[in-house]
Amino acid sequence: PRTIPWESILAVPAELFALNRSRLVERLKNNSSVDKDSVVVLEGGNEETRYCSDVGPVFRQESYFHWAFGVTEPDCYGVIRVKDGASILFVPRLPDEYAVWLGRIAPLESFRSRYQVDEVYYLDEIVEKLKALRPSYLLTLNGVNSDSGKTSREATFEGISQFQVDSTLLHQEITECRVIKTDLEVQVLRYVCEISSRAHVEVMKRVRPGMKEYQCEAIFLEYCYFHGGCRHCSYTCICHVGAPNDKTIDDGDMCLFDMGGEYYCYTSDITCSYPANGKFTEEQKIIYNTVLAANRAVLAAAKPGVSWVDMHLLANRTMLSCLKSHGLLQGDVNEMMKVNLGATFQPHGLGHFLGCDVHDVGGYLKGHPERSGVAGLKSLRTART
């Protein structure tokens, strides 16, 4: 039976983001290189259009800005004062004609109340209000994402040259905060993973030979949005029987569905594999159970203090042992491990962080194990314990 959405949608409290800001301030205070009269300045995502048209995609907030403020509107800035954690939100001053097409223009007080920040001003006042704070430095975000290799979005605005800017300190501290989730963040992650899991089950129930892959994608997307309020996906859905989501599914095909909903900028990532007709062949059983055995082995061994690299190697060893037991491989498993045969079956690294990005940040921050140069291990998204 269908669940009535408004009875089940998770309400994400502004307290989650206030706690994130508090954690960040605490780390900055404990960093002797940070002047206590500094202020953090973060720039949110911009509203964009599709190429040269005036039609835009559904806006999704920049992840660092969302983590700190939880603001869903585009073109905003946020400021956090290090010495006392005071928070200020700057929002765009919308023209009067905005109301004609998109509804009532929200007053500043509504932003302050909704997002539980200390002050709210219009963006065209940012220089004036920052000068009133008399900051020693503006701490801006500048660092490389170790998954994508791309550089984070650094705040910039007209008049920023009137301030001393330090772009070297913030990235390490805020990224380390994002790695370790609060209980409130875990609650949101559990929610979106639960919705996504149920959506996968719905696809399992309804998939049939003769359907198109994109129809399975549509079932997943509809379920996540209708039942869970997930307007976004964490990444482009992968529904591969052998084509980019447009193949007709044949009887006997093995479906691989890699899909995850996103709720309030918190992500999920779930992959399922099963035969479209519901019946595994003997060959399909071997591969499925091999991967399942690796999954269960890692879950049983994972605990605080365990190396991520060791868990990856455990998964490889388990799969090689299973494949050998079924006669698909010959030889000594230890020798297979030495030559990294497991990378043939798991060319990617085992797992990744989840958070405001599906491949969440912080895998290779300073002070933590560096990325291995060994073939088969350099694809790991982190080497942390």
Image: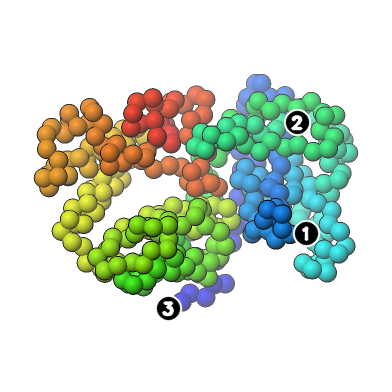
Q: Residue at x 66, y 38 (%)?
A: 153
> Which of pointers 1 and 3 lies earlier in the amino acid sequence?
3
Q: Quadrant of residue 97?
A: bottom right
Q: Residue at x 52, y 75 (%)?
A: 4
Q: Pointers 1 and 3 in contact (CB under 8 A)?
A: no
Q: Is residue 13 left or right of residue 106?
A: left
Q: Which residue is mark 1?
A: 110
How far is mark 2 from mark 3, CA to CA?
A: 53 Å
The amino acid type found where label 3 is placed reads Pro
Q: Residue at x 22, y 49 (%)?
A: 290
SS at circle 3: loop
Q: Which residue is mark 2?
A: 138
> Which of pointers 2 and 3 lies earlier in the amino acid sequence?
3
Q: Quadrant of residue 145?
A: top right
Q: Is residue 270 left or right of residue 186?
A: left
The amino acid type found where label 2 is placed reads Leu
The amino acid type found where label 1 is placed reads Ser
Query: Looking at the image, is mark 1 or mark 2 nearer the viewer?
Result: 2
Mark sitting on residue 1? 3
Question: How many other residues sit within 10 Å of disc 3, few (<14), some (14-19) or many (≥20)?
Answer: few
Q: Is residue 116 left or right of residue 218?
A: right
Examine the rendering and report whether any part of residue 83 can be seen.
no
Q: Tell me: residue 362, above or below residue 248.
A: above
Q: Pointers 1 and 2 in contact (CB under 8 A)?
A: no
SS at circle 2: strand
